Image: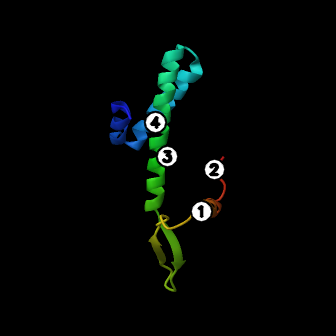
């Protein structure tokens, strides 16, 4: 991996996302030459992978609502999906999305 790719590990998620959006806009504008476009695309892929990894890590840290106790307080447990199969992870994400309801319009 290049030094540039390694240095992106230290960049905060929000900054990676902003830079990724800028790369996309530059590529969509069509004003870059071929070599600049390829370099930007490669940098964007690295940023995209880092963003996905950050989101996966954040998702693992989220606590799952386990149940509501008799006194009305929420009982939760840490979300640890490392023991789940990929299919179980997909099912769990689908269930969480359904609980949240449709995205706001």
Indicate which disc, 2 or 4, sits on the residue closer to the N terminus. Answer: 4
Sequence order check, earlier mark of 2 and 1: 1
Q: Residues within 10 Å of mark 1 (few under 14, many from 20)?
A: few
Q: CA distance from mark 3 to mark 4?
A: 10 Å
> Which comes sooner in the sequence, label 2 or label 3?
3
Q: To which residue does mark 3 refer? A: 52
Sequence-first tag of 3 and 4: 4
Which is in the foreground here, disc 1 or disc 4?
4
Question: How far is disc 1 from disc 3 in space, using C-alphas?
Answer: 18 Å
Task: Give the Cα distance between marks 1 and 4.
Answer: 28 Å
Q: Point out the frontmost of discs 2 and 4.
A: 4
User: 24 above or below 82?
Assistant: above
Q: CA distance from mark 2 to mark 1?
A: 16 Å
Point out the tag, 1 or 4, that comes first from the N-terminus.
4
Q: Residue at x 46, y 66 (%)?
A: 80
**Label 2 packing within 10 angstroms: few (<14), some (14-19), many (20+):** few
User: Rounded to the nearest whole Å, what is the CA distance between mark 2 and mark 3?
Assistant: 22 Å
Which label is found at residue 96? 1
The residue where tag 4 is placed is: 46
Residue 52 on image: x %, y %: 49, 46
**SS for dot 2:** loop
Q: In the image, which is nearer the foreground, mark 2 or mark 3?
A: 3
Which residue corresponds to the image point at 50% horizontal and 83% vertical from the top-left? 69
Q: Which residue is mark 2?
A: 104
Cβ atoms under marks 1 and 3 closer than 8 Å: no
**What is the secondary structure assignment of the residue under circle 1?**
helix
């Amino acid at each position: 991996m290049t030094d540039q790719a390694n240095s992106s590990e230290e960049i905060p998620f929000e900054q990676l996302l902003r830079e990724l959006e800028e790369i996309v806009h530059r590529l969509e504008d069509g004003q870059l030459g071929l070599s600049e476009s390829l370099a930007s695309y490669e940098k964007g892929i690295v940023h995209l992978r880092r963003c996905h990894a950050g989101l996966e890590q954040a998702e693992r840290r989220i606590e799952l609502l386990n149940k509501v106790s008799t006194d009305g307080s929420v009982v939760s447990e840490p979300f640890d999906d490392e023991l789940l199969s990929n299919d179980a992870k997909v099912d769990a994400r689908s269930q969480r999305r359904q609980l949240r309801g449709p995205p706001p319009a």
